[in-house]
Image (spheres, grey):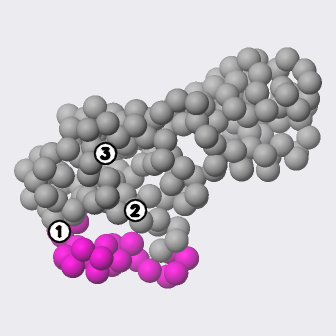
Amino acid sequence: MMNNGMHAFNKSVYVFEIDDVLYPKPEYLLQVYYLFSNFVEYTEGRPVAKDMVDFMKETLETMGEDEVLSKTIAHFGLHEGYRENFERLKANAHLPLKLILKDNIKRLLLSLFEKEKHVGILTDGNPVEQLNKLKHIDWQDLSRFLPLLKVFFIRELMFRNINPIDFLKEEYQVSADEISIVTGKELEF
């Protein structure tokens, strides 16, 4: 979604997705799997946490995120009630470790803020979960800029029948060609 002009910083507004852009998404998921497997071990009273988190990690790597919970429930003979526990945990988890910004993203964000560009988050996914991820990121040198960072939720805008780009144009008072959406693919440098 971004043109080669990114390195010239010739846009007014830069909005970023969270997952696999700010940080590698598996870093969040693996911590959720760890917390979930320990919850199951405690609830079931059987030592399954290590095997379960290993199974979940392997399933994530070989089959993808969408398969992890169903395969885990089947493999470990868990009742379907755990699905709700997992989804709640995934949205609201208090992670044991901070999520670390990718180095290239940290440098890019710092440059954008220093050049006084408008920087925001435009994210898809469960708004509660996406906010939770932002809360667990270790912003380091960028902490001082956080009050300038606006967060927009695609699902929320679409639910209100608002086109995200139209909303951003209005919010920042710019034309569509002044907005750059950073999804990650264009960051290979």
Give whichever of discs 3 and 1 has the lower sequence position.
3
Q: CA distance from mark 3 to mark 2?
A: 15 Å
Quarter occupied by residue 37: top right
Crowding near the residue tagged with mark 1, few <14, some 14–19, many ≥20 C-alpha atoms within 10 Å:
some
> What's the amino acid at mark 1?
Glu
What segment is highlighted magenta in the picture? Answer: 158-179
Label 1 secondary element? helix
- The x and y percentages for residue 120 are 31, 59
Q: Judge left or right: residue 97 versus residue 58.
A: left
Instruction: Give me the residue at 83% from left, 31% from top.
Output: 40
Instruction: Give me the residue at 74% from left, 39% from top.
Output: 69
CB within 8 Å, label 3 to label 2? no
Please name the residue that numbered disc 2 is placed on.
Answer: 151
Please name the residue that numbered disc 1 is placed on.
Answer: 178
User: 93 or 71, which lies in front?
Assistant: 93
Name the front one of labels 3 and 2.
3
Instruction: Give me the residue at 77% from left, 22% from top.
Output: 49
Q: Judge left or right: residue 17 versus residue 45.
A: left
Q: CA distance from mark 2 to mark 1?
A: 18 Å
Name the front one of labels 3 and 1.
3
Please name the residue that numbered disc 3 is placed on.
Answer: 143
Label 3 secondary element? helix
The quadrant of the rendering that contains the C terminus is top left
Give whichever of discs 2 and 1 has the lower sequence position.
2
User: 68 or 129, which lies in front?
Assistant: 129
- The x and y percentages for residue 186 are 26, 45
User: In the rendered structure, does residue 168 fall within the stretch colored magenta?
Assistant: yes
